[in-house]
């Protein structure tokens, strides 16, 4: 994409992406619900060697409500989170997440899903923790899934961030619907 500053990245070619469903490239992350998001996140970090990228806390008591964890590949840059815990019922899946090709692919795929009558949950917006451009949907069985593009990439040197709920929303996008917060499958 071209931007107003910096070198022009696209010259002499036109933007003509195919009008079709998003092209999913891989599973990006999974989010589980648990009554103990901090302890369960710590267990995964201690046991599987994940690294903490960010946590979001309750404003009054400082209790961790969400933890975002990434794979440790040393100096190599990896997605901001591959595994996330979130306050909720034990053993639940909040959403699974797929990386799509780019922002056009995400928006065109959104239109295809609208036209196909699927149930939309939240988006399109940009997250704060991980910075992905996101779009959330329900599959026919009620499991929530996410299309995203443009994640932050961190390596082993990054220090963990900490936010409270009121400071955790991204720079743009629609307000977070209550259904997203309470969803579990
Ligand atoms: Fe996600």
Image (cartoon, rainbow, N blue to C red):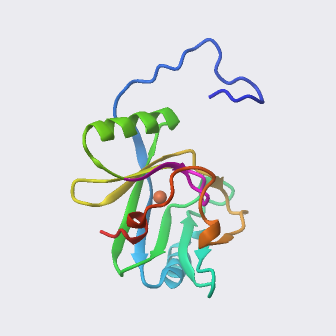
69 versus 9 height, above or below: below
Q: Residue furthest left?
A: 141
Q: Position of residue 27 (x, y in %)?
A: 41, 52
Q: Indicate the quadrant where residue 17 lies.
A: top left
Quarter of the image containing the C terminus?
bottom left
Q: Residue at left 65%, top 71%?
A: 163
Q: Position of residue 76 (x, y in %)?
A: 65, 53
Residue 144 seen anywhere in this rendered image of the structure: yes
Q: Residue at left 49%, top 80%?
A: 37
- For residue 117, side relative to residue 6 (left or right): left
- In this view, the residue in front, 48 or 120, is 120
Q: Residue at left 47%, top 19%?
A: 16
- For residue 122, side relative to residue 91 (left or right): right
Q: Is residue 129 magenta?
A: yes
Q: Position of residue 21 (x, y in %)?
A: 34, 35
Number of labelled discs?
Answer: 0
Q: Position of residue 101 (x, y in %)?
A: 47, 37
Q: Is residue 128 magenta?
A: yes
Residue 54 seen anywhere in this rendered image of the structure: no
Q: Indicate the quadrant where residue 69 lies.
A: bottom right
Q: Residue furthest top?
A: 12
112 versus 75 height, above or below: above
- For residue 132, side relative to residue 76 (left or right): left
Which residue range is magenta in the image? Answer: 121-132
Q: Residue furthest right?
A: 6
- In this view, the residue in front, 26 or 63, is 63
- For residue 71, side relative to residue 75 (left or right): left
Q: Indicate the quadrant where residue 181 lies.
A: bottom left
Quarter of the image containing the N terminus?
top right
Q: Residue at left 51%, top 37%?
A: 103
């Amino acid at each position: 994409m071209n931007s107003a500053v910096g070198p022009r990245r696209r010259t002499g070619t036109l933007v003509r992406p195919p009008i079709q469903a998003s092209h999913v490239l891989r599973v990006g992350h999974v989010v589980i619900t648990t009554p103990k998001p901090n302890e369960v996140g710590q267990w995964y970090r201690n046991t599987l060697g994940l690294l903490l990228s960010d946590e979001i806390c309750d404003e009054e008591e400082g209790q961790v409500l969400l933890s975002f964890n990434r794979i440790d590949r040393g100096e190599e840059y990896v997605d901001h989170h591959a595994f996330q815990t979130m306050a909720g019922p034990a053993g639940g899946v909040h959403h699974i997440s797929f990386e799509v090709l780019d922002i056009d692919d995400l928006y065109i795929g959104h239109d295809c899903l609208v036209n196909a009558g699927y149930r939309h949950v939240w988006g399109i917006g940009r997250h704060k923790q991980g910075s992905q451009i996101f779009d959330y949907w329900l599959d026919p069985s009620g499991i929530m899934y996410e299309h995203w593009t443009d994640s932050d990439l961190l390596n082993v040197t990054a220090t963990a961030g900490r936010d409270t709920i009121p400071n955790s929303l991204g720079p743009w996008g629609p307000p977070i619907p209550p259904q997203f917060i309470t969803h579990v499958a």
